[in-house]
Amino acid sequence: MVTIENLHKKFGSNVVLDGVDLTIKKGSILAVLGPNGSGKTTLIKSILGMVVPNKGTITINETSISKDWKYRQEIDYLPQIANFPGNLNVKELIKMIKDLRNKPAKDDELITFFKLEPFLNKKLSTLSGGTKQKVNLVLTFMFDSPFVILDEPTSGLDPISLIRLKELINAEKAKGKTILITSHIMSFVEEIAEGVIFILEGKIYFNGSVQELKTKTGQTDFEHAIANILSENHA
Amino acid sequence: MLKILKYSFYDLSRSRWSYIYFLFYLLLGVTLLFLNNDLSGAVITLMNVIIILIPLIGTIFGVMYYYNSKEFTELLLAQPVKRSSIFIGQYLGVAISLSASLVLGLGIPFAAYGLFESGVIWNFTVLLITGVFLTFIFTALAFNIALSNENKIKGFGYAVLLWLFLAVIYDGLFLLALVYFQEYPLDKFSLLATIFNPIDLSRILILLELDISALLSYTGAVFKKFLGTSLGALISFGMLSLWVILPVWRISAKAKKKDF
């Protein structure tokens, strides 16, 4: 279980998170939505300890994460932009991460699942965006951690890979994992997520289920409901 | 941390630049010895090259490595690894690989020439030890600069400026001060000014070891009196260590507060 209390973060004079309170229950799938620059990635990076908040606390399973790093053992994270060291090949990268984590990994299974065999000996700098994203997915899902964070998992994927990704997320869901997703593809979110939070200008504007969001905005379509919030607040 | 060090080292061992650096020293050593035919003369020439070149390579290489391994760092930050060990590990990877290039590149030709039978072995060892110290000092300073500057161009600029200041400008200012205040007793001042610049300190240490401190003119006697003693040597090496410890401490302090 993750509890976030009164989280504030500024980059220079730019306020990105302005008092976020959030509880993520164990075993739930939560989608974080919001326009570009609303603070979704900053929120995720704060949970991972990559961004140090100005104020506020984050606790995972009742222990505060500040000055701790071992808790990341229990988190699988898919970064938004797959930046890999360009001079390694795919195999070496996977081996390296496995070595760093020191945990059993099901990398072979996932490589077959995403059909990555032809790319194993290729340098990461030569891979296309979609293939890099698949490598990214393998690195994320190969450890069976109870908490999974996916930042824009669909970016660059072709339709077949997208279907495979959904299968994968559903399989993880069935194992009772806690999953946090950000995405701009509303149909994907509607299909996968149980709960939705909507961040606007660094605050949580809405926290509930997809159905509740539709009722609140008076729209029958999820995509329109989101657009409704956006246009209301930016008009 | 050892794992990060291992991967940084592995990464650098595949980089062309480590080999170029190594080959440069190898070539330098070979040319100096076999053209000069004079071991102690070679050591003096080497000192002049080393004292200027090591800080330059250390700063440039350190800054370059930090910016180039940004992706690697970002990948590591999401892993269960302590933040300070990521950066200290990378720092040690660079510093150790540069030092290895230096020690091996110079050590091999000197050993082949018959260093172990000659009397200058101790001089040569002091030369290498100060060289390694300078590598560690300037790589650490470079990491500090890179950590504080997101902008690559700025980072490189500051790094070159730092080198220029400590290698050239500092000496110029020092000399000017000596000339300007020549009526006053300056021995304590020059001693202090030397100690606060790692390049000057290394140069004096090697010169004293080579026993040519007469070259140092009127302050030479003071240096000899102070640094020539075992206490003085201890203090100078302590000072060099401090030049390593303080920047490394700041790397880990800075790394803890940085956002990625």
Image (spheres, coloured by chain):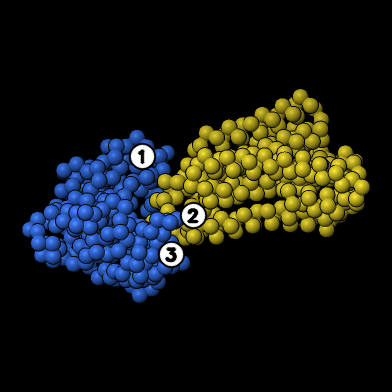
Chain colours: A blue, B yellow
Q: What type is the residue that disc 3 sits on?
A: Asn
Q: Is residue B77 visible?
A: no
Residue at 27% from the left image edge and 64% from the top image edge? A204
Tell which subunit mark 3 falls on: A
- Quadrant for residue A124, please give it: top left
Q: Is residue B159 above or below residue A232?
A: above
Check residue B40 in the rendering and tell me which mark sits there, or answer none: none
Tell which subunit mark 1 falls on: A
What is the crowding at mark 1: few (fewer than 14 residues within 10 Å), some, or many (at least 20)?
many
Q: What type is the residue that disc 1 sits on?
A: Leu
Q: Residue furthest left?
A: A220
Check residue B86 in the rendering and tell me which mark sits there, or answer none: 2
Mark 2 vs mark 3, foreground winner is: 3
- The residue pinned by badge 3 equals A54
Q: Secondary structure at mark 3?
A: loop
Residue closest to the eye, B101 or B225 = B225
Q: What type is the residue that disc 2 sits on?
A: Ile
- The residue pinned by badge 1 equals A124
Q: Where is residue A160 drawn, in percent x and y?
A: 16, 43
Residue closest to the eye, A171 or B172 = B172
Determine whether, in the image, residue B58 is placed left or right of residue B233: left
Mark 3 or 1 closer to N-term? Answer: 3
In the rendered picture of this protein, how many numbered marks are placed on residues?
Answer: 3
Tell which subunit mark 2 falls on: B
Q: CA distance from mark 2 to mark 1?
A: 21 Å
- Position of the N terminus of chain A, as image quadrant, is bottom left
Residue at 61% from the left image edge and 31% from the top image edge? B23
Residue closest to the eye, B215 or A173 = B215
Labels 2 and 1 touching (C-beta < 8 A) = no
Determine whether, in the image, residue A159 is placed left or right of residue A14: left
